[in-house]
Amino acid sequence: MWRYLRSVLWKAKLIRGVFNTAQSVNTDKFISNGPCSSVSGNKWVRPSGFATGLKTFNSLTKQKEPLILKRERVATWYSCGPTVYDHAHLGHACSYVRFDILQRILSRLFGITVIHAMVITDIDDKIIKRSWEENVSPTTIATVYEDEFKRDMLSLKVIPPAVYLRVTENVHHIVAFIEGIIKNGHAYATKEGDVYFDIQSIGDRYGKFVGAVDSQGEPGSTNKRDSRDFALWKQSKPQEPYWESPWGRGRPGWHIECSTIASSVFGSQLDIHSGGIDLAFPHHENEVAQSEAYHQCGQWANYFLHSGHLHLKGSAEKMSKSLKNYVTIKDFLQSYSASEFRMFCLLTKYRSAIDYSESSMLEARTSLGTISTFIHDAKAYMKGQLQCTPVQEAVLWERLAETKYSVVNALADDFDTPRAISAVMNLVYHGNCQLQPVSKSDGVARSPAVFGAMVSYIRDVLDVFGIDLLHIKEADVISSCGSLEGIVEKLTHFRSEVRAFALARQDGPIAGSPNKLGLYPERIPLLKACDILRSDLAPLGVLIKDRGATSTWELTQGKPSQRGQDKDQETSS
Ligand SMILES: [Zn+2]
């Protein structure tokens, strides 16, 4: 058991911090990866390749499967990006942040280089409609909201994909892709100039995500062979943007862009395809049908990962633009930080629906606050500012080793982030239990190293998830004032001296004095002034903690801190 644990941890440690640059992509031609596995029907075939030791839920089989990659320690990953016609909202943020966390886990914890390509849908009915409403060109609308989307993702600390690809820059590829599908006998053009995918031509292969029998199909030409057939190419209507094609002027259907662009980067096989659960049908179903028809293969993408919806608490509806029940990312970031949003996402599994509310965000904030406070206290202990009863060091070393084991195991099991966070919080709990402040601890053995190890490990894990506690603090100090830290240090020191003077006991009881503690009555106002200073600084983001005779401080991101009310900070009474 322990030998296995050591080898897992050694492996994880060995590969941590290895950042491979994504390989350059080839958008000029389709890369041939050799023959695809050839199967009939919907049966999923376990890929041949390199086992990763991870398991992931695969929407194609609706169960957890071992994650096997075509190349050793390299994952090809395609994701459907935004349709850029409006502000991105928290529902989008949630999906992108969750998959960003998954990719960080693969790369930073398991040493797998993720080559992530994402499409930007910059031509679409909604973009055209918006451009008419605003009386500007579709390109203008798309450019404005694409830029905003990229800025939003950066402010949420989402690592950009290796490459973003726009639909409008790939229309010639899309036309060639459609020609290939027609040549293979799986699509047909109508006399109006539309091209449809021929669902009957693939028999029982259609319906990998839902029972295809129940599907209604999209509205369209009456010349469709089957009501479920979907558009690959749509003839242009007057005043719409168009491209020339063998079927006349028109523009691509929605699903074909993803099949074409993913194939242009990764060829005929893809390790992982991701998107929100609402994209599974018909979008991903149709992507699969098109790609397998083009490549003449039985299994194009080996794993489909779908993230759950974000709901406003108390509402059964997902957050969406059409329902007008959304919060924009920019508005959200006025009240909460990117790290707090990440913690909110980490507290549920990526596949689950997630309830957004003030209270769920406060829960995330509190979890991060608990971790920050522990790190602060552990550092104060290491510096000798916080004096404690003797620490059971061996217990803490053991807890730390167990936590590392639990975190790696949880994340290898379909990226179970709530279980990993729970293991970290448990470590924090045990660390806090050992930090019992005493006013005098002369001669007591100290154990700073184990606290140093815990601080470093917790920071490393949060860094894997994209939460950088260290950087948040530094950025705050730099942005507010370069010497703020020095000023707070001096102020706290001065206050400590005053407090120590005010807390001094009289030698003996004074007759008739109501003060049982034996304080000098004339010094009590100084003690009260110290309390007032502490509570006045808390809303300004400076949290002073009194530890017996000494005091420590931390910056709390400029937000009012509820932790300022903690009981362990009582001074005068
Ligand atoms: Zn797509």
Image (cartoon, rainbow, N blue to C red):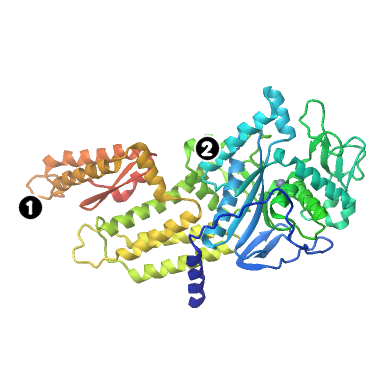
Question: Front-most of 156 and 397?
Answer: 156
Marks 1,2: beta carbons within 8 A? no
Rendering coords of residue 380 (x, y %): 29, 55
Question: Front-most of 79 and 544?
Answer: 79
Rendering coords of residue 394 (x, y %): 35, 71
Picture layout, residue 19 above or below residue 489: below
What kind of element bears circle 2? helix
Residue at (28%, 40%) from the top-left corner? 483
Q: Is residue 157 left or right of residue 41?
A: left
Mark 2 lies on residue: 332
Residue at (16%, 48%) from the top-left corner? 500
Rendering coords of residue 501 (x, y %): 14, 46
Dot 2 amino acid type:
Phe
Query: Which mark identifies residue 69?
Result: none
- Return the disc, 1 or 2, that comes first in the chain's sequence: 2
What kind of element bears circle 1? loop
Question: Front-most of 294 and 448?
Answer: 294
Neighbours of disc 2 within 10 Å: few (<14), some (14-19), many (20+): some
Q: Residue furthest top?
A: 135
Q: Is residue 174 left or right of residue 474?
A: right
Task: Report whether residue 361 is seen.
Answer: yes
Dot 1 amino acid type:
Asp
Query: Which mark identifies residue 507?
Result: 1
To which quarter of the image does residue 255 belong? top right
Foreground mark, 1 or 2, reads 2
Question: Front-most of 255 and 347?
Answer: 255
Residue at (88%, 43%) from the top-left corner? 227
